[in-house]
Every structure is written in C-alpha cells, then in structure tokens.
Amino acid sequence: MVITAIPELLKRQANEESPRTPQRRRGFVWCYKIDSRLCSSVSDVCSAEFELIAHVFGSDQTRADPLEGNEPMPLVVARALLQRVISDPINGLQARINDILASIDQRGDFDAGSKKLDTFVVIHEKASGLFSLLKDSAQKMILKETAKKSVDSDLKNKGLDSTSRQSQAIARNAVDLDKSGCTLLIPPAPRRRDSTLAEKGILEEYRAPVVPLDKQQLLKSGLNALLSGPLKQSVLLQPLVHATESLARARLMFSSGKKKGGETTARVVCSIYSQMCSFYGEGFLYPIMEVLRDTRKTNPPAQPPQLPFNQDMPAHDLGVEQHFWVCLERLHSAAKAFDREMWAEGRADTGRVWEILERCDDQDSMSKARACRFEFYSELERRGEAAIMKALDSISAHIHWILVSGGEGMLATGANRLMANITGSSAGPYAVPQGANMDSSLSPAVESLVYCLRVQFVHVQSAMTSHSVAGFWTALSMRLYDILVARLLKHYQVSQQGAAILRGDVDALRGASMLSSGSPHDHWDMLQELITLYMIPPDSVKGMLVGPEGDMSLGKGLFGRAGRDQCLVFLSRRVDYKFKQGASLKRSGWAEGLLNDLGLSDPTDHGINIGLFAAERKP
C-alpha cells in the first residue's frame, strides 16, 4: 500500500539523476521533491490510513495485540505505519533527508553554501508542517488522551531526530572552505553506509567530515603561498561570516517563536559551535601552525658568514624570516576573531553562541560548548608554543654560527697565533696583544649579531603580545649569554686590551637583550662585573675578589656577589694566568701566590662544568 501510494518515497525513479549528476544539483532536486510532493503525499496517505485503521480495528480502545502489551490496537498499527513511512532506515522520509545532507558537496564554495542553508530551512519547515498534520489526524482517530499523547510523543521524537540531522548539516555547511582562497585540501574518505545498522532497522547518524589542509603541499609552497592563500584576510573571515549566518538561521528554525529558545535551539547552536571549533582548529589553523614549526631549520649554513655584515643591506634573518612572524600574527588575529565573532562572552544582543546558550538556560549545552572552546585554544596554544620554540632554536643556532664560525674564523693569524703559542690554547677574539691597533670597540661578530637581533626584535614584537615578547626575548637573551660564556670559559683567553673589546661586546649584547621591557637581565649585570677581573693588574685582583679589607670571611667583593668558584673560573681565562712549559701548562707565579694567600684550590684543575654557569642559575 505504502509503495503504491508514495512511489517517490519508497522507489527509485527510472529517470532519477544518475550518479554522475553533480552532488549539489541532486541535493536541490530532492529538496524540490520534498517541497512539492513528498510531504503532502505522506500526510494524505497517513490521514487516510488512520481512518482505515480506526474503521478496521474498531473504536474499542481496550482491544490490544497480546504482543504489544496493553496498548490499544489502533495505536499499535498507527505507530507501525509511522515507523515504516518516516523511520525506515533505507527508504523512509528521514533516510531521504539524510541522502540530501550526505549529497552536499563538501568542497563547494561559500556562495553555494548560502543556497544549501536555504535548502535546510525548507526541509525543516516541510517536516515540521508534516508532523503537525499527522498529529491532527491521529487525534481524530484515537480517542483516549493517553494514546494521543503517546502518538504525539512518537512524532515529536521523530521530528527531533530529523531536526538533529538538519542541525548537523547546517554545522557541516558552516565549515566549507573557500576554494578560491585555498585549494590545498586533503579530500575526505568517501562516506559509506553502514549496512549492519540498516539491517537492524537503525537509521545511521549523519556525521560531518573534517577536510584539513594538506600540510605537505603547504610545506612545498612556502610561507608566501600561506600568506596569499589560507592566511589571506578574506579567507580567514569568510568561515566566520557564514558561521554567524548559520547561528542566525538556527535561531529562526529551532526557536519556534520563543524569545529565549529552548533545548533544541541550544543543542543545534552547540553543534554548530563544535563543528566550527573542529574545522577552524583541526582542519585549518592547526595544520598551518604545524607548517610554521616544520619550516624552521635549526642547521645554519655550512660556510661561515662574511663579517662584518653590511648594515646598509637587509639584515640576516637568523633562520626565521619576516614572513614567519607575519603568519604567526595572522593566526593570532584569526584566533581572536574566532572568539569575538563566535563566542562573544559577556556581550549582549550579539546573537552569538554564549548569548544564545545563556538565554536557552541549557547547562549541558553550555558546558559542552565551553569544553570545545577550551580544547580549541589549548591545542592551538600548544602548537603555537612548539612553533615558537622551533624558531628560538633556529635563532640560537644562527647566533652560534655568527659568533663561533664567523667570529673565530676571521681572526688574524699573526698576533692570535703568537698568543696561542704562549698560552697553549686557541686564544680567541679577546687575546689582543698589548699595543695592537683596534679599529672598533666591538668585535665584528658581535657588531653584526646585534644588528640582526635589533631587526629580528621588530618582527617578533609585531607578531606577539607584550607578555609573550618579554618571555621569548628573555629566553633568547639567556641562550645568547650561555653561548658567549661557554666559549669564553672553555676556548678564549682575555688580555687587558682585549678586555675592553669584551666589555664593549657584553654591553652591546646586553643592550640588545633589553629591547623588551620587563625582561630580567641579572646574568648580564653579573658578567659585566666579572669582566673587570681581566682589566686590572695582578696585584689588584685580591682586593677585587674579597674586598678592600682583604678578609674573605666578610663576604665582600666579587666572592660575596658571584661566588668563589665562579670568580676563580673566570679569573683563569686571563692570558697571564697560565703559560706553556714544555708540553704542559703551568700557573704563573702571581696566580699561585693568590691561591695560597686565599687558602683555595684552583677549580679548573678538575675541569669546568659549564652547566653551573648557565644564565638561569643564580649565584
């Protein structure tokens, strides 16, 4: 009977669109069928069958099927009819609606997205009208109030089931990515029906796929392609514009004229927000942030730099080009815009998620939405920190490249080779012989590095908040300090004349580290004091270490401020502290006398643990 009366519902038409018909068109065609014929046919057939059921099974409401308990027989038969027509997992009305939702082109553009939303509005209106007509027909047939309520409940549940699938489709539509702005997508796996559910009579739930950006293609394209594609301002804003349209349509469709809305409205809005968090995070921002991380190279060039850099030319990027920071700033702006345009907590009359859920007074939906919001920003922050740490590693590696490969590689052979013969080790850039000509108060490596750091700071400052800039620049300052101190204590020798260059270098590096206000610089301040050990004659060293009284127990001098072992290790880097005798090194007479006078042993006799001199350790 049902097959004969409603062929467009339960039979595939011979002239129905072939599988090659564009998915968007097929969806609109079925929407037309529901609009023009299907719902009215279902209503007419069910109304007629309700009358027939009442006539055949009589008006005796106590008559019941033993298998169905104590329910009236007309009610049992009416429910079976509705189950067949509406909820059949293969050919029922809800199954056909699911076919429409599943056929939506998930890679369509946003212009088509607006038409799809109109399609969902039509589906909802027709389905709601159908259920209303069916309830009226059921009331005429069934006399008892309890039976009427039972049928009403069945129809309501079926209506909510259909509503849920439409709300999921609206949420799915909100996450379509604009192909004109970015074509670098990973196609989702084809959606397959679960035949086991259909065999059990269970209608399969519609699930929106995630269509993430293809990271491999983005890595090949480079940061310029990111800025002109996915991170273009229009592309970043369009998902938010259409998501807010989805919120507005959801309120019109599911509020049922109520000013505050209800549980259905809250559930739909929560679903839209959850889908947007999934798309904007997992499908969009997360892959881009991971690309930023993976494009950082921590290996500097194999060839040493040609120093000093020409400051009339663009500064070296230290492994982190300006486009990296521009991309990071746009991601940060997109995350803020997402919260402002979608959540908008505390802002009245916005029609955004927080306000809608607050008015609906649905605590379950509110808690789910808050959890989605928290997960979205937590995951984005975690990936952002990983990208920034990779940038920090890259800058640190290039700092080492400039100071070590560049600074030590360009040393003049004559005087430094002479110092190496005297001291028995590589003298480094600060073992300047007495009376040597100095063209600059800074070493070429530090002069070039400071120039690059100042330019880099401008880019960093434009991409992050002041608090984040302070944290990043403090970490960079400590790494810079550790690189310099490690080379000084293990490889360099410092003469009195070279100490002036070292002092100038430390002052310049400290100045670059202080570009960010609020960053601690205690490690640089202490290093400035320790450098004075290289600038004074040997007979003044004891007073500098223990104070003018000459009493170490008073805790004055550098011993009291920096610690005994740290001071003695720094002192050991003076060019006159040791000299080469045969195949070994021997302490000079004034150094032996100082240690005996203080009653201390030389901590460098057993090697130097550079970790004890790191910037993060307090003296």
Image (tube, helix red, strand yellow):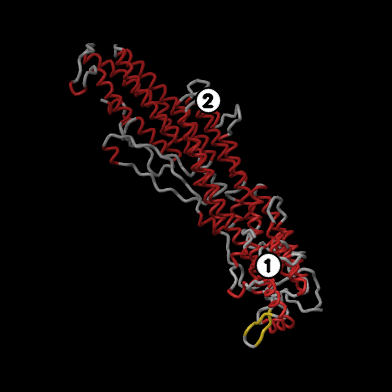
Q: Quadrant of residue 403?
A: bottom right
Q: Quadrant of residue 302?
A: bottom right
Q: Where is residue 513? Give x, y as percent.
A: 70, 58
Q: How many marks?
A: 2
Of the 4 image quadrants, the one containing the N terminus is top left
Q: Nearer the viewer, mark 2 or mark 1?
A: 1
User: What residue type is disc 1 on?
Assistant: Cys
Q: Where is residue 137? Give x, y as percent.
A: 34, 16
Q: Where is residue 106? Give x, y as percent.
A: 46, 43
Of the 4 image quadrants, the one containing the C terminus is bottom right
User: What residue type is disc 2 on?
Assistant: Arg
Quick check: 43 left or right of 211? left
Which residue appears farthest toward the left when viewing the image?
Answer: 66
Q: Residues within 10 Å of mark 1 (few under 14, many from 20)?
A: some
Closer to the camera in the image, 209 or 547: 547
Closer to the camera in the image, 412 or 600: 600
Q: Secondary structure at mark 2?
A: helix
Q: Is residue 611 above or below residue 576?
A: above
Residue 448 at least partly seen: no
Q: Is residue 64 above or below residue 486?
A: above
- Compute the Cα span from label 2 to label 1: 67 Å
Residue 327 at least partly seen: yes
Mark 1 lies on residue: 567
Name the residue located 56 percent from the left edge and 47 percent from the top edge. Answer: 180
> Mark 1 or mark 2, which is nearer the start of the sequence?
2
Mark 2 lies on residue: 359
Q: Residues within 10 Å of mark 2 (few under 14, many from 20)?
A: few
Q: Are marks 2 and 1 in contact (CB under 8 Å)?
A: no
Q: Where is residue 65? Give x, y as percent.
A: 19, 20
Name the residue located 48 percent from the left edge and 33 percent from the top edge. Answer: 367
Quick check: 451 left or right of 50? right
Q: Secondary structure at mark 1?
A: helix
